[in-house]
Image (cartoon, rainbow, N blue to C red):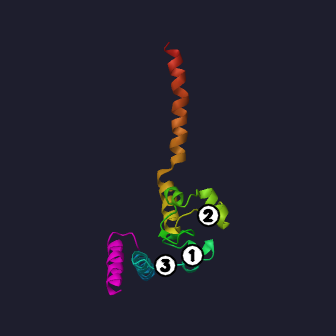
Amino acid sequence: MTSLLQMAKDLVAEQIALGKIPPEETSHHLHLTHDTLQKLHRQEQGRRPVAAEAEAAERPADWKTSITKHAITCLECGVSLRQLSSRHLRVHDLDAKSYRLKYGIPSAPPLSSRQATKRRQELAQQIRPWEKAQAAARVAAKAPAKAKGTR
C-alpha cells in the first residue's frame, strides 16, 4: 500500500504544479486520490467492490457544502471539479436541470466553484458582451436597409 500512497502524492503534486489544485486543498485531494487508488487496487485484485453506502459517506450531505471556494463536488460520484459541466453530468445520464431537481438545488446558484463564478463575472464586466450585442443589432438593422436601396 506504500506504493499507492507514493502514487497519490505524485499525482497530487503534479496537479498542484499544473495549477489545477490550489495548495490549500492539498490534504483533501491527497486523501481523495489515495482512497480512489485503494478502491481501484481492491477491484483489480478481485475483491468485493466498495459498497455504495461507503462511497456516499464521502460525498457532502448537502448541496450547499458541495460548493467551496475552489471546487464543487459532484453529488453523484464525489469527484471535485471547478465546475460541473454538461459533459461531466452526461456521464451520469443527467443534465443541469435534472441534476438540480435530483438534489434540490435552486436554479440561481451556478454549478461551479465560487472562485470560477467570480472570475466569470469579472470577465463579463471587462468584455461587456451586452454592449457588443446592441452594436451588432444596430449594424444588422442598417444593413438590410442599405441592401434594399442598391437593387
Q: Quadrant of residue 67?
A: bottom right
Q: CA distance from mark 3 to mark 2?
A: 38 Å
Pinpoint residue 48: horizontal percent, then vertical percent.
Answer: 49, 78
Q: Is residue 38 magenta?
A: no
Q: Amino acid at mark 2?
A: Pro
Q: Looking at the picture, which amino acid does disc 3 mark?
A: Arg
Q: Position of residue 62 (x, y in %)?
A: 63, 75
Spot the residue most to the bottom: 2
Marker count (numbered): 3
Q: Nearer the viewer, mark 1 or mark 2?
A: 1
Residue name at image x 42 percent, y 79 percent = 42
The first of marks 3 and 2 along the sequence is 3
Q: Nearer the viewer, residue 92 or 147?
A: 92
Residue 109 is tagged as: 2
Q: Quadrant of the N terminus?
A: bottom left
Q: Viewer-proximal residue, 135 or 61?
A: 61
Question: Mark 3 highlights which residue?
Answer: 48
Which residue is nearer to you in this view: 73 or 69?
A: 73
Label 1, secondary structure: give it.
Answer: helix
Badge 3: few (under 14), some or many (20 or more) residues near its Cα, within 10 Å?
few
